[in-house]
Image: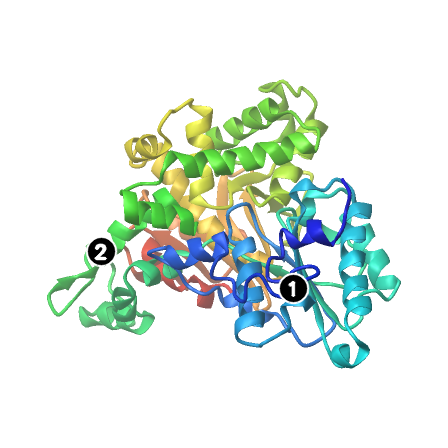
Protein backbone atom coordinates (compact mmCIF):
# COMPACT_ATOMS: atom_id res chain seq x y z
CA UNK A 1 0.00 0.00 0.00
CA UNK A 2 1.50 3.31 -1.11
CA UNK A 3 0.99 5.93 1.57
CA UNK A 4 0.57 9.60 0.62
CA UNK A 5 -1.55 12.61 1.53
CA UNK A 6 -4.18 11.70 -1.02
CA UNK A 7 -4.70 8.36 0.67
CA UNK A 8 -4.89 9.98 4.11
CA UNK A 9 -7.39 12.59 2.90
CA UNK A 10 -9.95 9.85 2.24
CA UNK A 11 -10.49 9.54 6.00
CA UNK A 12 -9.92 13.28 6.55
CA UNK A 13 -12.28 15.01 4.10
CA UNK A 14 -12.21 18.21 6.17
CA UNK A 15 -8.65 18.88 4.97
CA UNK A 16 -7.82 21.50 2.34
CA UNK A 17 -8.26 19.92 -1.09
CA UNK A 18 -4.81 19.09 -2.43
CA UNK A 19 -3.53 21.68 -4.92
CA UNK A 20 -6.65 23.89 -4.87
CA UNK A 21 -6.41 25.50 -1.46
CA UNK A 22 -10.13 24.93 -1.02
CA UNK A 23 -11.75 22.86 1.65
CA UNK A 24 -14.05 20.06 0.53
CA UNK A 25 -16.21 20.20 3.67
CA UNK A 26 -16.41 22.64 6.55
CA UNK A 27 -18.14 20.48 9.16
CA UNK A 28 -18.78 16.87 10.10
CA UNK A 29 -22.51 16.91 9.35
CA UNK A 30 -21.84 14.64 6.38
CA UNK A 31 -20.02 12.03 8.47
CA UNK A 32 -21.93 8.71 8.64
CA UNK A 33 -20.96 8.16 12.28
CA UNK A 34 -22.19 11.62 13.30
CA UNK A 35 -25.27 11.30 11.09
CA UNK A 36 -26.20 7.97 12.71
CA UNK A 37 -25.60 9.40 16.18
CA UNK A 38 -27.82 12.43 15.53
CA UNK A 39 -30.64 10.35 14.01
CA UNK A 40 -30.90 7.94 16.94
CA UNK A 41 -34.12 8.22 18.96
CA UNK A 42 -32.08 7.76 22.14
CA UNK A 43 -28.77 9.54 22.28
CA UNK A 44 -26.72 11.48 24.75
CA UNK A 45 -23.38 13.20 24.48
CA UNK A 46 -20.97 10.85 26.25
CA UNK A 47 -19.81 12.26 29.57
CA UNK A 48 -16.31 11.01 28.78
CA UNK A 49 -15.90 13.83 26.23
CA UNK A 50 -15.23 16.22 29.10
CA UNK A 51 -12.38 14.06 30.40
CA UNK A 52 -9.99 14.87 27.54
CA UNK A 53 -7.70 17.88 27.87
CA UNK A 54 -7.33 19.10 24.29
CA UNK A 55 -4.92 21.91 25.19
CA UNK A 56 -1.88 19.93 26.32
CA UNK A 57 0.59 17.34 25.09
CA UNK A 58 -1.26 14.22 26.11
CA UNK A 59 -1.51 10.67 24.85
CA UNK A 60 -4.87 9.14 25.75
CA UNK A 61 -5.96 5.57 25.17
CA UNK A 62 -9.73 5.09 25.04
CA UNK A 63 -10.66 1.50 25.84
CA UNK A 64 -14.00 -0.21 25.25
CA UNK A 65 -15.51 -3.28 23.67
CA UNK A 66 -16.86 -3.47 20.16
CA UNK A 67 -20.01 -1.40 19.77
CA UNK A 68 -19.38 0.66 22.91
CA UNK A 69 -19.16 3.94 20.98
CA UNK A 70 -15.42 4.65 20.80
CA UNK A 71 -15.54 5.83 17.16
CA UNK A 72 -18.49 8.09 17.99
CA UNK A 73 -16.49 9.66 20.81
CA UNK A 74 -13.56 10.37 18.46
CA UNK A 75 -15.79 11.88 15.79
CA UNK A 76 -17.66 14.03 18.33
CA UNK A 77 -14.33 15.35 19.61
CA UNK A 78 -13.27 16.22 16.05
CA UNK A 79 -16.64 17.89 15.46
CA UNK A 80 -16.19 19.91 18.64
CA UNK A 81 -12.70 21.04 17.60
CA UNK A 82 -13.81 22.16 14.15
CA UNK A 83 -17.20 23.68 14.91
CA UNK A 84 -16.84 24.98 18.47
CA UNK A 85 -13.12 25.49 19.06
CA UNK A 86 -12.55 26.77 15.50
CA UNK A 87 -9.39 24.66 15.14
CA UNK A 88 -7.86 24.66 11.64
CA UNK A 89 -9.22 21.37 10.20
CA UNK A 90 -5.87 20.77 8.47
CA UNK A 91 -4.35 20.28 11.94
CA UNK A 92 -6.66 17.35 12.74
CA UNK A 93 -5.72 13.83 11.63
CA UNK A 94 -8.02 10.80 11.94
CA UNK A 95 -7.29 7.27 10.80
CA UNK A 96 -9.01 3.92 11.31
CA UNK A 97 -6.52 1.06 11.37
CA UNK A 98 -8.64 -1.60 9.64
CA UNK A 99 -6.37 -1.72 6.57
CA UNK A 100 -3.03 -1.57 8.42
CA UNK A 101 -0.90 -4.50 9.50
CA UNK A 102 2.23 -3.12 11.19
CA UNK A 103 3.10 -0.28 13.53
CA UNK A 104 5.69 0.87 10.97
CA UNK A 105 2.83 1.62 8.56
CA UNK A 106 0.98 3.56 11.25
CA UNK A 107 4.10 5.56 12.11
CA UNK A 108 4.58 6.40 8.44
CA UNK A 109 1.01 7.74 8.24
CA UNK A 110 1.49 9.95 11.26
CA UNK A 111 4.86 11.26 10.07
CA UNK A 112 3.43 12.11 6.63
CA UNK A 113 0.69 14.15 8.31
CA UNK A 114 3.10 15.97 10.64
CA UNK A 115 5.65 16.65 7.89
CA UNK A 116 2.88 18.07 5.68
CA UNK A 117 1.79 20.45 8.41
CA UNK A 118 5.33 21.63 9.11
CA UNK A 119 6.42 21.92 5.48
CA UNK A 120 3.30 23.16 3.71
CA UNK A 121 2.20 25.80 6.22
CA UNK A 122 4.33 28.87 6.84
CA UNK A 123 5.95 29.17 10.30
CA UNK A 124 3.88 32.21 11.35
CA UNK A 125 0.71 30.28 10.66
CA UNK A 126 1.90 27.38 12.82
CA UNK A 127 3.09 29.52 15.71
CA UNK A 128 1.21 28.45 18.80
CA UNK A 129 -0.77 25.87 16.83
CA UNK A 130 -1.66 22.46 18.17
CA UNK A 131 -2.05 19.25 16.20
CA UNK A 132 -4.61 16.56 16.98
CA UNK A 133 -4.16 12.90 16.09
CA UNK A 134 -7.05 10.43 16.44
CA UNK A 135 -6.21 6.78 15.74
CA UNK A 136 -9.20 4.42 15.78
CA UNK A 137 -9.00 0.66 16.59
CA UNK A 138 -5.25 0.76 17.10
CA UNK A 139 -5.44 -2.66 18.77
CA UNK A 140 -5.75 -4.20 15.27
CA UNK A 141 -2.02 -3.49 14.84
CA UNK A 142 0.41 -5.90 16.43
CA UNK A 143 2.84 -4.31 18.90
CA UNK A 144 1.30 -0.88 18.38
CA UNK A 145 2.65 0.49 21.71
CA UNK A 146 6.16 0.10 20.29
CA UNK A 147 5.35 2.47 17.43
CA UNK A 148 3.76 5.14 19.65
CA UNK A 149 6.69 4.92 22.07
CA UNK A 150 9.12 5.57 19.21
CA UNK A 151 7.22 8.67 18.05
CA UNK A 152 7.03 10.06 21.58
CA UNK A 153 10.69 9.36 22.35
CA UNK A 154 11.77 10.93 19.05
CA UNK A 155 9.94 14.15 19.94
CA UNK A 156 7.50 13.81 17.05
CA UNK A 157 4.48 14.42 19.26
CA UNK A 158 5.34 17.87 20.63
CA UNK A 159 2.46 20.36 20.51
CA UNK A 160 0.22 17.39 19.76
CA UNK A 161 -2.75 15.81 21.51
CA UNK A 162 -3.06 12.10 20.68
CA UNK A 163 -6.17 10.00 21.32
CA UNK A 164 -6.05 6.30 20.51
CA UNK A 165 -9.03 3.95 20.67
CA UNK A 166 -8.59 0.27 21.40
CA UNK A 167 -10.95 -2.70 21.66
CA UNK A 168 -8.35 -4.61 23.65
CA UNK A 169 -6.99 -3.82 27.07
CA UNK A 170 -3.20 -3.89 26.90
CA UNK A 171 -2.67 -3.96 30.66
CA UNK A 172 0.91 -3.16 31.61
CA UNK A 173 2.29 -3.78 28.12
CA UNK A 174 2.50 -0.10 27.21
CA UNK A 175 5.99 1.34 27.59
CA UNK A 176 5.08 4.99 27.12
CA UNK A 177 3.23 7.46 29.32
CA UNK A 178 -0.47 7.63 28.54
CA UNK A 179 -3.76 8.26 30.30
CA UNK A 180 -6.27 5.42 30.07
CA UNK A 181 -9.98 6.08 29.67
CA UNK A 182 -12.76 3.49 29.65
CA UNK A 183 -16.13 3.67 27.94
CA UNK A 184 -18.71 1.25 29.30
CA UNK A 185 -22.21 0.26 28.29
CA UNK A 186 -25.13 1.94 30.08
CA UNK A 187 -25.87 1.10 33.69
CA UNK A 188 -29.49 0.42 34.64
CA UNK A 189 -29.86 3.94 36.05
CA UNK A 190 -28.49 5.48 32.83
CA UNK A 191 -30.78 3.19 30.87
CA UNK A 192 -33.91 4.30 32.77
CA UNK A 193 -32.82 7.93 32.58
CA UNK A 194 -32.67 7.66 28.82
CA UNK A 195 -36.05 5.91 28.39
CA UNK A 196 -38.00 7.70 31.10
CA UNK A 197 -36.10 10.56 32.76
CA UNK A 198 -39.20 11.72 34.65
CA UNK A 199 -39.52 8.32 36.33
CA UNK A 200 -35.92 8.39 37.51
CA UNK A 201 -36.42 11.88 38.92
CA UNK A 202 -39.32 10.57 40.97
CA UNK A 203 -37.63 7.36 42.05
CA UNK A 204 -34.73 8.99 43.87
CA UNK A 205 -32.84 7.43 46.74
CA UNK A 206 -34.44 9.77 49.25
CA UNK A 207 -37.94 9.03 47.92
CA UNK A 208 -37.29 5.31 48.13
CA UNK A 209 -36.31 5.69 51.78
CA UNK A 210 -39.27 7.97 52.44
CA UNK A 211 -41.53 5.23 51.16
CA UNK A 212 -39.77 2.70 53.33
CA UNK A 213 -40.32 4.70 56.50
CA UNK A 214 -43.98 5.41 55.66
CA UNK A 215 -45.19 2.04 56.92
CA UNK A 216 -42.97 1.84 59.97
CA UNK A 217 -40.63 -0.97 60.92
CA UNK A 218 -37.44 -1.46 62.90
CA UNK A 219 -35.29 1.68 62.74
CA UNK A 220 -37.77 3.11 60.26
CA UNK A 221 -37.22 0.28 57.76
CA UNK A 222 -40.11 -2.15 57.16
CA UNK A 223 -39.52 -5.88 56.65
CA UNK A 224 -40.67 -5.84 53.04
CA UNK A 225 -41.96 -3.70 50.19
CA UNK A 226 -44.08 -5.42 47.60
CA UNK A 227 -45.00 -2.36 45.54
CA UNK A 228 -43.40 1.06 45.39
CA UNK A 229 -46.16 3.65 45.20
CA UNK A 230 -46.35 7.41 45.54
CA UNK A 231 -49.60 9.31 45.22
CA UNK A 232 -51.38 6.23 43.98
CA UNK A 233 -48.91 5.52 41.15
CA UNK A 234 -47.22 2.15 40.90
CA UNK A 235 -43.57 2.78 40.13
CA UNK A 236 -42.46 -0.76 40.96
CA UNK A 237 -44.25 -2.17 37.91
CA UNK A 238 -42.55 0.43 35.72
CA UNK A 239 -39.13 -0.40 37.15
CA UNK A 240 -39.75 -4.12 36.62
CA UNK A 241 -40.78 -3.39 33.03
CA UNK A 242 -37.58 -1.44 32.31
CA UNK A 243 -35.50 -4.06 34.08
CA UNK A 244 -36.85 -6.74 31.73
CA UNK A 245 -35.95 -4.61 28.73
CA UNK A 246 -32.49 -3.96 30.16
CA UNK A 247 -31.97 -7.68 30.72
CA UNK A 248 -32.71 -8.22 27.02
CA UNK A 249 -30.96 -5.29 25.32
CA UNK A 250 -28.17 -4.63 27.77
CA UNK A 251 -26.60 -1.20 27.88
CA UNK A 252 -25.61 -0.91 24.22
CA UNK A 253 -27.19 2.12 22.55
CA UNK A 254 -27.60 0.42 19.14
CA UNK A 255 -29.68 -2.28 20.86
CA UNK A 256 -31.75 0.26 22.75
CA UNK A 257 -32.44 2.30 19.61
CA UNK A 258 -33.30 -0.83 17.66
CA UNK A 259 -35.79 -1.77 20.39
CA UNK A 260 -37.27 1.73 20.24
CA UNK A 261 -37.73 1.65 16.45
CA UNK A 262 -38.34 -2.05 15.74
CA UNK A 263 -39.72 -3.41 19.01
CA UNK A 264 -36.67 -5.64 19.36
CA UNK A 265 -32.96 -5.91 18.64
CA UNK A 266 -32.41 -6.55 14.94
CA UNK A 267 -30.50 -9.69 14.07
CA UNK A 268 -28.01 -7.58 12.11
CA UNK A 269 -26.80 -6.02 15.36
CA UNK A 270 -26.05 -9.43 16.85
CA UNK A 271 -24.41 -10.57 13.61
CA UNK A 272 -22.22 -7.48 13.33
CA UNK A 273 -20.94 -7.78 16.88
CA UNK A 274 -20.33 -11.52 16.51
CA UNK A 275 -18.50 -11.00 13.22
CA UNK A 276 -16.27 -8.29 14.69
CA UNK A 277 -15.34 -10.39 17.70
CA UNK A 278 -14.68 -13.59 15.75
CA UNK A 279 -12.71 -11.63 13.14
CA UNK A 280 -10.50 -10.24 15.90
CA UNK A 281 -10.04 -13.73 17.34
CA UNK A 282 -9.12 -15.11 13.92
CA UNK A 283 -6.69 -12.24 13.29
CA UNK A 284 -4.90 -13.26 16.48
CA UNK A 285 -4.52 -16.75 15.01
CA UNK A 286 -7.00 -18.39 17.38
CA UNK A 287 -9.73 -20.93 16.68
CA UNK A 288 -13.24 -19.40 16.59
CA UNK A 289 -14.84 -22.84 17.08
CA UNK A 290 -12.88 -23.33 20.28
CA UNK A 291 -13.91 -19.84 21.38
CA UNK A 292 -17.58 -20.80 20.96
CA UNK A 293 -17.07 -24.05 22.90
CA UNK A 294 -15.42 -22.18 25.76
CA UNK A 295 -18.23 -19.64 25.93
CA UNK A 296 -20.80 -22.45 25.93
CA UNK A 297 -19.19 -23.73 29.14
CA UNK A 298 -19.20 -20.23 30.61
CA UNK A 299 -22.94 -19.97 29.94
CA UNK A 300 -23.65 -23.38 31.45
CA UNK A 301 -21.69 -22.48 34.60
CA UNK A 302 -22.46 -18.77 34.90
CA UNK A 303 -22.03 -17.65 38.49
CA UNK A 304 -20.27 -20.85 39.58
CA UNK A 305 -16.53 -21.35 40.10
CA UNK A 306 -15.16 -22.86 36.89
CA UNK A 307 -11.67 -24.29 36.53
CA UNK A 308 -9.64 -24.16 33.33
CA UNK A 309 -9.15 -27.92 33.42
CA UNK A 310 -12.92 -28.48 33.68
CA UNK A 311 -13.46 -26.41 30.53
CA UNK A 312 -10.57 -28.12 28.74
CA UNK A 313 -12.09 -31.59 29.27
CA UNK A 314 -15.33 -30.49 27.59
CA UNK A 315 -13.81 -28.70 24.59
CA UNK A 316 -11.34 -29.48 21.83
CA UNK A 317 -8.60 -27.62 23.73
CA UNK A 318 -7.80 -30.47 26.14
CA UNK A 319 -5.05 -28.36 27.76
CA UNK A 320 -5.88 -25.95 30.59
CA UNK A 321 -3.25 -23.40 29.52
CA UNK A 322 -5.05 -22.98 26.19
CA UNK A 323 -8.30 -22.22 28.02
CA UNK A 324 -6.54 -19.64 30.18
CA UNK A 325 -5.10 -17.99 27.07
CA UNK A 326 -8.47 -17.75 25.28
CA UNK A 327 -10.28 -16.40 28.35
CA UNK A 328 -7.57 -13.78 28.87
CA UNK A 329 -8.00 -12.69 25.24
CA UNK A 330 -11.80 -12.51 25.61
CA UNK A 331 -11.35 -10.57 28.84
CA UNK A 332 -9.00 -8.11 27.13
CA UNK A 333 -11.72 -7.61 24.48
CA UNK A 334 -14.27 -6.65 27.17
CA UNK A 335 -16.46 -9.64 26.33
CA UNK A 336 -16.07 -11.52 29.62
CA UNK A 337 -14.41 -10.89 32.95
CA UNK A 338 -12.98 -13.37 35.43
CA UNK A 339 -13.47 -12.97 39.18
CA UNK A 340 -10.97 -14.61 41.52
CA UNK A 341 -11.70 -16.14 44.90
CA UNK A 342 -10.37 -14.27 47.92
CA UNK A 343 -7.74 -15.85 50.16
CA UNK A 344 -7.56 -15.57 53.96
CA UNK A 345 -6.24 -11.99 53.65
CA UNK A 346 -9.04 -10.91 51.31
CA UNK A 347 -6.63 -10.88 48.37
CA UNK A 348 -7.45 -12.49 45.01
CA UNK A 349 -5.88 -15.88 44.46
CA UNK A 350 -5.36 -17.45 41.03
CA UNK A 351 -4.87 -20.93 42.50
CA UNK A 352 -8.58 -21.57 42.84
CA UNK A 353 -11.35 -21.72 40.24
CA UNK A 354 -12.61 -18.38 38.96
CA UNK A 355 -16.11 -17.20 38.22
CA UNK A 356 -16.61 -15.94 34.67
CA UNK A 357 -19.23 -13.37 33.67
CA UNK A 358 -20.23 -11.50 30.54
CA UNK A 359 -19.55 -7.76 30.59
CA UNK A 360 -23.10 -6.87 29.49
CA UNK A 361 -26.46 -8.71 29.19
CA UNK A 362 -26.40 -8.17 25.41
CA UNK A 363 -23.16 -10.16 25.15
CA UNK A 364 -24.73 -12.93 27.23
CA UNK A 365 -27.65 -13.22 24.79
CA UNK A 366 -25.32 -12.94 21.81
CA UNK A 367 -23.45 -16.09 22.77
CA UNK A 368 -26.50 -17.78 24.29
CA UNK A 369 -28.24 -17.55 20.92
CA UNK A 370 -25.06 -18.43 19.02
CA UNK A 371 -24.32 -21.52 21.13
CA UNK A 372 -27.91 -22.78 20.72
CA UNK A 373 -27.91 -22.24 16.96
CA UNK A 374 -30.82 -19.79 17.04
CA UNK A 375 -31.79 -17.96 13.84
CA UNK A 376 -33.54 -15.11 15.69
CA UNK A 377 -31.62 -14.14 18.82
CA UNK A 378 -34.15 -11.54 19.97
CA UNK A 379 -37.13 -13.87 19.85
CA UNK A 380 -35.06 -16.63 21.44
CA UNK A 381 -34.00 -14.33 24.30
CA UNK A 382 -37.61 -13.27 24.93
CA UNK A 383 -38.69 -16.91 25.12
CA UNK A 384 -35.90 -17.86 27.52
CA UNK A 385 -35.68 -14.72 29.69
CA UNK A 386 -38.01 -15.88 32.47
CA UNK A 387 -36.83 -19.45 32.64
CA UNK A 388 -35.72 -19.71 36.25
CA UNK A 389 -32.15 -20.82 35.50
CA UNK A 390 -31.64 -18.17 32.82
CA UNK A 391 -33.18 -15.31 34.78
CA UNK A 392 -31.21 -16.16 37.93
CA UNK A 393 -28.01 -16.19 35.92
CA UNK A 394 -28.86 -12.84 34.36
CA UNK A 395 -29.61 -11.28 37.76
CA UNK A 396 -26.16 -12.26 39.00
CA UNK A 397 -24.50 -11.20 35.75
CA UNK A 398 -26.17 -7.77 35.80
CA UNK A 399 -25.12 -7.21 39.42
CA UNK A 400 -21.59 -8.18 38.40
CA UNK A 401 -21.53 -5.82 35.40
CA UNK A 402 -22.42 -2.90 37.67
CA UNK A 403 -19.86 -3.82 40.32
CA UNK A 404 -17.20 -4.29 37.63
CA UNK A 405 -17.34 -0.55 37.00
CA UNK A 406 -15.83 -0.10 40.45
CA UNK A 407 -12.94 -2.42 39.57
CA UNK A 408 -12.24 -0.40 36.41
CA UNK A 409 -11.94 2.66 38.63
CA UNK A 410 -9.15 1.02 40.62
CA UNK A 411 -10.96 -1.30 43.00
CA UNK A 412 -10.91 -5.09 42.98
CA UNK A 413 -13.74 -7.58 42.70
CA UNK A 414 -13.52 -11.06 44.19
CA UNK A 415 -15.78 -13.68 45.79
CA UNK A 416 -15.58 -15.56 49.09
CA UNK A 417 -16.17 -19.27 49.51
CA UNK A 418 -15.81 -21.84 52.28
CA UNK A 419 -15.51 -25.13 50.44
CA UNK A 420 -15.88 -27.19 53.63
CA UNK A 421 -19.08 -25.59 54.93
CA UNK A 422 -20.34 -24.86 51.40
CA UNK A 423 -20.93 -21.21 52.23
CA UNK A 424 -20.42 -18.40 49.71
CA UNK A 425 -20.60 -14.62 49.37
CA UNK A 426 -21.10 -13.82 45.71
CA UNK A 427 -18.99 -10.65 45.51
CA UNK A 428 -16.47 -8.78 47.60
CA UNK A 429 -16.00 -5.22 46.40
CA UNK A 430 -12.63 -3.86 47.53
CA UNK A 431 -12.73 -0.07 47.44
CA UNK A 432 -11.01 2.92 48.99
CA UNK A 433 -13.17 2.68 52.12
CA UNK A 434 -12.70 -1.04 52.65
CA UNK A 435 -14.42 -4.21 51.48
CA UNK A 436 -18.17 -4.53 50.90
CA UNK A 437 -19.50 -8.12 50.83
CA UNK A 438 -22.57 -8.65 48.63
CA UNK A 439 -24.81 -11.73 48.62
CA UNK A 440 -27.57 -12.47 46.10
CA UNK A 441 -30.84 -13.95 47.32
CA UNK A 442 -33.19 -12.74 44.57
CA UNK A 443 -35.18 -15.97 44.23
CA UNK A 444 -34.41 -17.45 47.64
CA UNK A 445 -35.63 -16.86 51.15
CA UNK A 446 -33.14 -15.03 53.35
CA UNK A 447 -32.26 -17.21 56.36
CA UNK A 448 -30.30 -16.88 59.57
CA UNK A 449 -27.58 -18.98 57.96
CA UNK A 450 -27.12 -16.29 55.31
CA UNK A 451 -26.53 -13.70 58.03
CA UNK A 452 -24.08 -16.00 59.81
CA UNK A 453 -22.10 -16.42 56.58
CA UNK A 454 -21.00 -12.79 56.75
CA UNK A 455 -19.63 -13.34 60.26
CA UNK A 456 -17.99 -16.59 59.18
CA UNK A 457 -16.18 -14.64 56.45
CA UNK A 458 -15.10 -12.00 58.99
CA UNK A 459 -17.54 -9.23 58.05
CA UNK A 460 -19.71 -7.31 60.50
CA UNK A 461 -21.58 -5.47 57.73
CA UNK A 462 -22.75 -6.38 54.26
CA UNK A 463 -25.48 -6.27 51.63
CA UNK A 464 -28.03 -8.86 50.57
CA UNK A 465 -29.87 -8.28 47.30
CA UNK A 466 -33.43 -9.56 47.52
CA UNK A 467 -36.44 -9.64 45.25
CA UNK A 468 -38.53 -7.11 47.19
CA UNK A 469 -37.40 -7.08 50.82
CA UNK A 470 -36.08 -3.83 52.26
CA UNK A 471 -34.79 -4.22 55.81
CA UNK A 472 -31.73 -4.40 58.05
CA UNK A 473 -30.79 -7.39 60.18
CA UNK A 474 -27.64 -7.64 62.31
CA UNK A 475 -25.99 -4.76 60.39
CA UNK A 476 -26.72 -6.50 57.09
CA UNK A 477 -28.64 -4.26 54.67
CA UNK A 478 -31.25 -6.13 52.65
CA UNK A 479 -32.51 -4.33 49.56
CA UNK A 480 -34.43 -5.05 46.33
CA UNK A 481 -32.53 -5.61 43.12
CA UNK A 482 -33.83 -2.46 41.40
CA UNK A 483 -32.84 -0.31 44.39
CA UNK A 484 -29.32 -1.75 44.34
CA UNK A 485 -28.88 -1.26 40.59
CA UNK A 486 -30.12 2.34 40.77
CA UNK A 487 -28.02 3.39 43.76
CA UNK A 488 -25.16 0.87 43.98
CA UNK A 489 -22.39 3.48 43.60
CA UNK A 490 -22.96 4.91 47.06
CA UNK A 491 -22.86 1.43 48.58
CA UNK A 492 -19.50 0.18 47.28
CA UNK A 493 -17.08 3.13 47.37
| Figure check: 33 above or below 340 | below
| Element assignment for label 1 | loop
Q: Which mark is residue 16?
A: 1
Image side of residue 233 versus residue 183, left or right: left
Residue at horizontal 87 percent and vertical 62 percent from the top: 153
Foreground residue, 491 or 361?
Answer: 361
Residue 89 sits in quarter = bottom right
Image side of residue 283 versus residue 302, left or right: right
Q: How crowded is mark 2: few (under 14 residues within 10 Å), some or many (20 or more)?
A: some
Residue at horizontal 60 percent and vertical 65 percent from the top: 23
- The residue singled out by tag 2 in the image is 238
Residue 386 position in % (x across, y down): 29, 36
Image side of residue 319 versus residue 366, left or right: right
Q: Do the residues labelled 1 and 2 touch (CB within 8 Å)?
A: no
Residue 77 sits in quarter = bottom right
Residue 190 position in % (x across, y down): 39, 61
Foreground residue, 395 or 345?
Answer: 395
Residue 189 position in % (x across, y down): 37, 61
Q: On the rendered image, what quadrant is the N terminus found in?
A: top right
Amino acid sequence: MEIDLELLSIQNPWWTQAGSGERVVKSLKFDPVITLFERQPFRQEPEILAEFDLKGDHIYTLYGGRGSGKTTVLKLLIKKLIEEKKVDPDNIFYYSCHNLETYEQLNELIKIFLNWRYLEASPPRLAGKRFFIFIDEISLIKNWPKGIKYLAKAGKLKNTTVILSSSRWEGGQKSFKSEDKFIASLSFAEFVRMLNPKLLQKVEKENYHRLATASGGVNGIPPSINKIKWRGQNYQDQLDYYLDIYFLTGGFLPCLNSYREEGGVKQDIYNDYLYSLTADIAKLGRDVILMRQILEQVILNLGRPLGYQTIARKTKAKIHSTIAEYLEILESMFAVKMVCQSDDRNKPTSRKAKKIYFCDPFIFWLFYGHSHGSLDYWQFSRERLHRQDVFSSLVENVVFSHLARNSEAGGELTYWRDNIKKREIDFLVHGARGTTPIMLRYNREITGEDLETFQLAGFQKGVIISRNEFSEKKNIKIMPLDYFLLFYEGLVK
